[in-house]
Image (cartoon, helix red, strand yellow):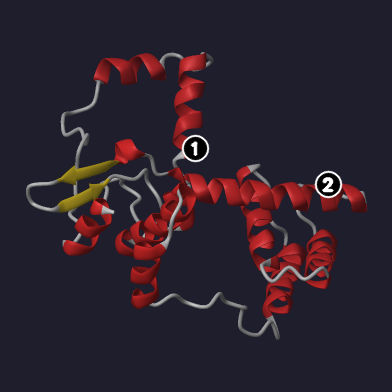
């Protein structure tokens, strides 16, 4: 496709469209400060909290906490505050069930526990330290998919037929060239892509992520 040719022909260009450089609204700041019990202040606080993590990270952490909560309920123990028994038992279940990322579930539970205002006692901290070592010991290397060569990609670009097949190849090209994570590629929309046919340059703008926390675009 023509756009793929443009994509491979030039290096990606940074773009800073839509970034505001003016000073903030002091009147709005004061009104929010005086609205301690109102909905406007709560919306601002919730939005601010949502900026702590990228959308993909929040989604992953939520999924991990759903499973952690279900396991806690099954064991008859509270989700928070964390306890040494809960940490050890749930991590044991995850490891025995084949979860290579068991330590990431533990980290999500620790973050959730902290965000709920609970401090870890000495016994729980010791259990967490032991659990982290046990979760990662003897895991071995992860099973990876076989990489695809540039020649194979060129062949697929020329020979594949059908809308969905072509879209998969185009998505692979886009993610590889702009170094997009899978979640960023999935969230990409055509309005985020800009084609400069004169200079043969393709630019994209993505929402904030681990690689672009300020949402400058890439």
Tell me the residue that label 2 is attached to.
Answer: 78
Q: Secondary structure at mark 1?
A: helix
Question: Which residue is at 61% across, 52% downward?
Answer: 111
Q: Dots 1 and 2: beta carbons under 8 Å?
A: no
Quadrant of image for the N terminus: bottom left
Report the disc number at residue 49. 1
Question: Who is closer to the viewer here, 145 or 65?
Answer: 145
Q: How far apart in space, not on screen, are marks 1 and 2 (Cα)?
A: 24 Å
Position of 87 relative to 167 (above/below):
below
Query: Is 124 situated left or right of 198 in this image?
Result: right
Q: Earlier in the sequence, mark 1 or mark 2?
A: 1
The answer to which image quadrant residue 190 occupies is top left
**Could you tell me residue 43's position as x and y percent?**
49, 23
Query: Is 196 situated left or right of 61 in this image?
Result: left
Query: Is 22 situated left or right of 211 in this image?
Result: left
**Could you tell me residue 146's position as x and y percent?**
52, 78
């Amino acid at each position: 496709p023509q756009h793929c040719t443009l994509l491979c022909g030039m290096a990606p260009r940074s773009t800073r469209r839509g970034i505001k450089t003016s000073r903030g609204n002091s009147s709005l700041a004061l009104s929010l400060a005086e609205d301690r019990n109102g909905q406007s202040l709560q919306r601002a606080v919730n939005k601010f909290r949502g900026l702590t993590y990228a959308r993909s990270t929040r989604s992953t952490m939520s999924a991990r906490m759903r499973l952690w909560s279900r396991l806690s309920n099954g064991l008859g123990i509270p989700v928070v505050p964390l306890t040494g028994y809960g940490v050890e038992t749930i991590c044991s279940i995850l490891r025995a069930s084949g979860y290579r990322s068991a330590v990431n579930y533990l980290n999500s539970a620790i973050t959730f526990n902290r965000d709920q205002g609970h401090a870890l006692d000495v016994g729980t901290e010791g259990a967490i330290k032991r659990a982290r070592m046990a979760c990662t010991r003897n895991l071995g290397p992860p099973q990876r998919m076989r990489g695809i060569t540039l020649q194979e990609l060129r062949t697929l670009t020329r020979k594949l037929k059908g809308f969905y097949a072509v879209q998969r190849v185009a998505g692979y090209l886009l993610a590889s060239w702009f170094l997009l994570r899978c979640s960023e590629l999935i969230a990409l929309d055509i309005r985020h892509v800009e084609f400069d046919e004169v200079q043969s340059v393709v630019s994209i703008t993505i929402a904030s992520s681990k690689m672009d926390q300020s949402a400058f675009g890439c």
